[in-house]
């Protein structure tokens, strides 16, 4: 089952890359969760979380942020959480400073001007890039992966 998922994922990514080699359009949508993921990798040190693990955690944060900003139904995040857990990926992180994660994200190479740029899900058929996100919403989206 996981092999089928991986093969299908590779086919989809290949199609995006072939259609947008320079990452100026739809290919950027593949970065869903990556702004958070790169900050987790930097904060914890590369190797603490594999890239895929960090992206899975970032995906959950991005979906939560999509709920806050666009009203995306929380069932998408909950189903994603169940799936990530089922395939053995982490869905929670213990002991991290959300303020520091936010500072790290503000230094991300994909930021626009001085704003953090996020790929978000507006609705099930629409992914968008948004750099007009409040710090309050960023912190709340990070809380979704925090272990208590």
Image (spheres, rainbow, N blue to C red):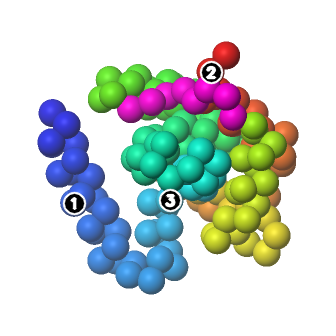
Q: Which residue is mark 2?
A: 147
Q: Residues within 10 Å of mark 1 (few under 14, many from 20)?
A: few
Q: Which residue is mark 1?
A: 11
Q: Is residue 73 visible?
A: no
User: Residue lying furthest bottom in this view?
Assistant: 22
Q: Image check: 55 left or right of 102? A: left
Viewer-closest of 69 and 48: 48
Between marks 2 and 1 in the image, the one whose residue lies nearer the viewer: 2
| Vertical comparison of 19 with 45: above or below | below
Image spot of residue 38 (x, y percent): 57, 55
Q: Which residue is mark 3?
A: 31
Q: Image check: 99 left or right of 51? A: right
Q: Is residue 132 visible?
A: yes
Q: Give whichever of discs 2 and 1 has the lower sequence position.
A: 1
Q: Which residues are magenta?
A: 89-96
Q: Give whichever of discs 2 and 3 has the lower sequence position.
A: 3
């Amino acid at each position: 089952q996981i092999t089928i998922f991986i093969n299908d994922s590779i086919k989809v990514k290949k199609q995006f890359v072939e259609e947008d080699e320079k990452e100026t359009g739809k290919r950027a949508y593949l970065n869903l969760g990556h702004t958070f993921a790169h900050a987790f990798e930097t904060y914890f040190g590369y190797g603490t979380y594999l890239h895929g693990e960090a992206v899975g955690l970032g995906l959950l944060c991005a979906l939560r942020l999509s709920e806050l900003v666009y009203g995306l139904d929380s069932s998408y995040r909950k189903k994603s959480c169940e799936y990530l857990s089922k395939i053995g990926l982490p869905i929670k992180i213990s002991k991290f400073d959300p303020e520091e994660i936010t500072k790290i994200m503000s230094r991300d190479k994909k930021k626009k001007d001085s704003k953090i740029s996020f790929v978000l899900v507006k609705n099930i058929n629409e992914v968008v890039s948004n750099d007009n996100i409040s710090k309050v919403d960023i912190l709340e989206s990070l809380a979704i992966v925090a272990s208590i």
